[in-house]
Image: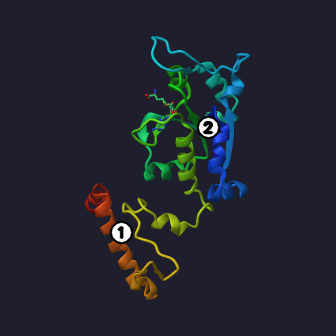
Amino acid sequence: MKFDVLTLFPEMFQAVKESVIGKAIEKELIDINLINIRDFSKDKHKKVDDTPYGGGAGMVMMPDVVYDAYCSIKDRENAKVIYLSPQGKTLNQQKVESLSKEKHIILLCGHYEGIDQRVIDEIVDEEISIGDYVLTGGELPAMVLIDSVSRYIEGVLNESSIEEESFSKGLLEYPQYTRPEEFLGRTVPDVLKSGHHQNIEKWRKEQAIKITGEKRPDLLKKFEDAE
Ligand SMILES: C[S@@+](CC[C@H](N)C(=O)[O-])C[C@H]1O[C@@H](n2cnc3c(N)ncnc32)[C@H](O)[C@@H]1O
């Protein structure tokens, strides 16, 4: 899977290149290519934004600079172009899984007051938000998308991790424990030490239902309606 990222702050993406995703890059399972939009400024001061028509606060990223940065991407016609935007549809696990089936995704990160609407209308296939709040830029949302989508790419994680995880089966995950067996007087549930796989499975399912009901009753209702 190839991600091309159009951004004014490519240095920020070091954060997504660590740990599991870093290993996936090393194994060439994913490729994250960063394109600095500022490199396409025609201005000697490398200006990329200007004041909004009609007045108002802040600066707007100029359409021609963003468009030239986009046109520098090879095979862009076959890629899905996503603009990270608070106005987009909120990202969820189903969307993450469906995006993992794409071969090439171009992520457009806005900054300041956002991007001139004309270039959005010209190049963007879909707008995605990571929640109903406003961030200073699309870089953190782009990293959230890269991280969550990459976990579904074959070879990045071991498959059972994904199957068991929160949201994958419509429930939150059961509680996890590791050594030591006793910590500050708290012990590991006996069933997990029993070696009885059926009982462990049953306990985990009951816990997942209990926890989902406590923390996300909306999810539990959807799960029960679907059963
Ligand atoms: C300060 S925001 C612009 C907000 C815009 N003026 C509005 O009110 O809709 C700057 C950039 O951050 C990104 N951004 C901010 N919040 C986001 C969110 N919740 N999800 C995805 N991207 C977001 C977008 O790329 C946006 O262009």
Q: Amino acid at mark 1?
A: Ala
Q: Amino acid at mark 2?
A: Asn
Instruction: Give the labeled residue for mark 2.
Output: 78
Label 2 secondary element? helix
Counting other residues with Cα less than 10 Å from the Cα at mark 1, is it few (<14), some (14-19), or many (20 or more)? many
Q: Is residue 46 left or right of residue 104?
A: right
Instruction: Give the labeled residue for mark 1.
Output: 208
- The image shows residue 179, relative to residue 5, as above or below, that is below
Expressed as whole percent of the image width and height from the top left, the position of residue 118 reads 52, 20
Q: CA distance from mark 2 to mark 1?
A: 40 Å
Q: Residue at point 42% right, 42% down?
A: 131
Q: Is residue 209 left or right of residue 121?
A: left
| Quarter of the figure with residue 175 | bottom left
Residue 1 in sight from this viewpoint = no
Q: Is residue 175 left or right of residue 161?
A: left
- The image shows residue 174, relative to residue 57, as above or below, that is below
Q: Residue at point 47% right, 75% down?
A: 177
- The image shows residue 52, relative to residue 40, as above or below, that is above
- Identify which residue, 85 or 169, lies in the foreground: 85
